[in-house]
Amino acid sequence: MFWTLLKLLVFVVAVIALAYGAGALMDSGQTVGLRILDMEFTLGPVQAIIAFGVFLVGLWLVLKALSLSLALLRFMNGDETAIRRFFMRNREKRGLDALLASMLAQSTGDSKTAIAKAEKAHKLLNRPIMTNLLIAQAAEAKGNTAMALEHYKGLLDDPRSRFVGVQGLIRAELALGETDKARALAVKALEMQPAHEKTQDTLLKLQTEAEDWKGARKTLETKKSSGHLPRDVYRRRDAILALQEADALAAKDQLPRARDAAIEANRLSPDLVPAAVAAAQALVAQGKGSYAARAIKRAWKAAPHPELAAAFAAIEKDESPRQRLSRFEKLLKMHPDADESRMLRAELLIAAEDFPAARRALGDLFETRPTLRALTIMAAIERGEGADDAVVRGWLARALTASRGPQWVCQNCQHVHASWQAICDNCGAFDSLEWRDAPDSSGPSATQSELLPLIVGSLPKPAAEPDAEVIDADAPAEEARADKPA
């Protein structure tokens, strides 16, 4: 409020001063004489001021005309820049307006208008990086891959925009289904900026899809070196890639190299179940059974798993059931209360025909965790103890509708796999499978009852015959429920 009053007061004082000065000048009677050639002019005070103002305006016009004349003269002499500075300001303004309109249309999703305005700006402005990028992005959003490809290529000429151009070309080639070209471009992009995380992820995905395991391991190393991957995660994923490399080498009959890769995978991640199994098989093939057992024990110590038990059983094939049970004791003592340990002990005792001990080993697992495998074991125990066929069929009928238990489930899409894989068949995610109960346990099981012959050999014939009878007879569910034990 104070400043407003002060400014108002200053303005009033200035007006009064000007009015007083003008009045004093008018009352003074002074004149100004002006002589041009043979003409003389006598001007009063006000007229002199007006004449001075007209003189200044005329002088400005003369200077502008002189500047234009000089620009034209330089243009005629070959200096194109001077005339452009004088005449091309409007062209630049229209180009900037078109560029702004294109950016606004792009932000609202109007790709058609964005492309049209960007092409207009491309003609009016000498800004190829800006306009090429805008046209390429608008074309990409519209789905015009060919146009996007063309303008992304235009970004490769300038070192400032080359990396962005390569990134755009990768996306365009992927949209066209040219995965090999996209992978080659991703390699070039990673060479330009090794620490760029998105490029690392894109290249790693393309390499795993193409089964380029050696290249994928190199990319993974770059990702870890740039700080985008924790060391423990890096070692696990590197182990998975080494395991995949071992499978690829084995498919080419390069067995020594395949075994070395499998052993390296286990060294990188001892608790990775597939790596431990593959390493054990490789070590057994090399005649190093004790080292194979050590690899299985390390993985079992982290978490019991039926595939580890099967691999441990395969180390010594020619042994009696009692010898196998004795050899498995060191394994079973690591996690005596785990579900897997209890079922495994029961299966080993069934093979040794010690059915009461098998029942004690299983305990109440068929009630607390009634999985298909636990109920199948109970059916084998009942058969071994001489129970009626109806009792055995009752247990098997319950097993048909029971939970499948832990399986290989993708964390990303919840798809269930019959065996472990590095890449999910359903969603393509890498290193996403984990051993746990599936959300929907219907469908084929990863283990069912096939683990029993893997570990302990074939079941006794009396126990195998009821299984065939159940399959052929297809007993009604009502009969099975009636024969089910309490």
Image (tube, helix red, strand yellow):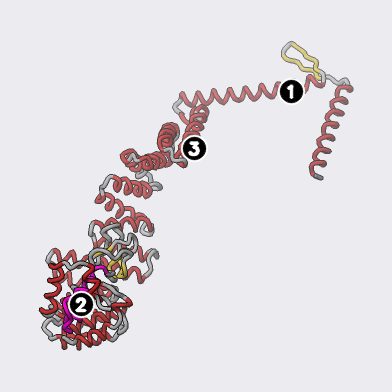
122 lies above or below 436: above
Q: Earlier in the sequence, mark 3 or mark 1?
A: 1
463 lies above or below 51: below
Q: Earlier in the sequence, mark 1 or mark 2?
A: 1
Q: Where are the magenta residues, as a range?
A: 381-401
Q: Amino acid at mark 1?
A: Phe
Residue 381 location in percent, x, y? Answer: 20, 81
Residue 189 location in percent, x, y? Answer: 33, 53
Q: Residue 130 appears in which quarter of the rendering?
A: top left
246 lies above or below 387: above
Tag of residue 100: 3
Q: Which residue is mark 2?
A: 391
- Mark 2 and mark 3: Cα distance apart in space: 81 Å
Q: Are marks 3 and 1 in contact (CB under 8 Å)?
A: no
Residue at coordinates 89% horizontally, 23% vertically from top-left?
28
Q: Of 339 and 117, which appears nearest the observer?
A: 339
Q: Would you say residue 386 sits in the magenta stretch? A: yes
Residue at coordinates 28% horizontally, 61% vertically from top-left?
424
Label 1: element kind: helix
Number of residues whose C-alpha sits closer than 10 Å to that of mark 2, classed few (under 14), some (14–19) or many (20 or more): many
Q: Amino acid at mark 2?
A: Val
- Residue 124 is left or right of residue 298, and the answer is right
Please identify the dominant SS of the magenta region. helix
Q: Nearer the viewer, mark 1 or mark 2?
A: 2
Asked if residue 46 can be seen in this view, the reply is: yes
Residue at coordinates 31% horizontally, 39% vertically from top-left?
146
Tag of residue 52: 1
- Mark 3 and mark 1: Cα distance apart in space: 45 Å
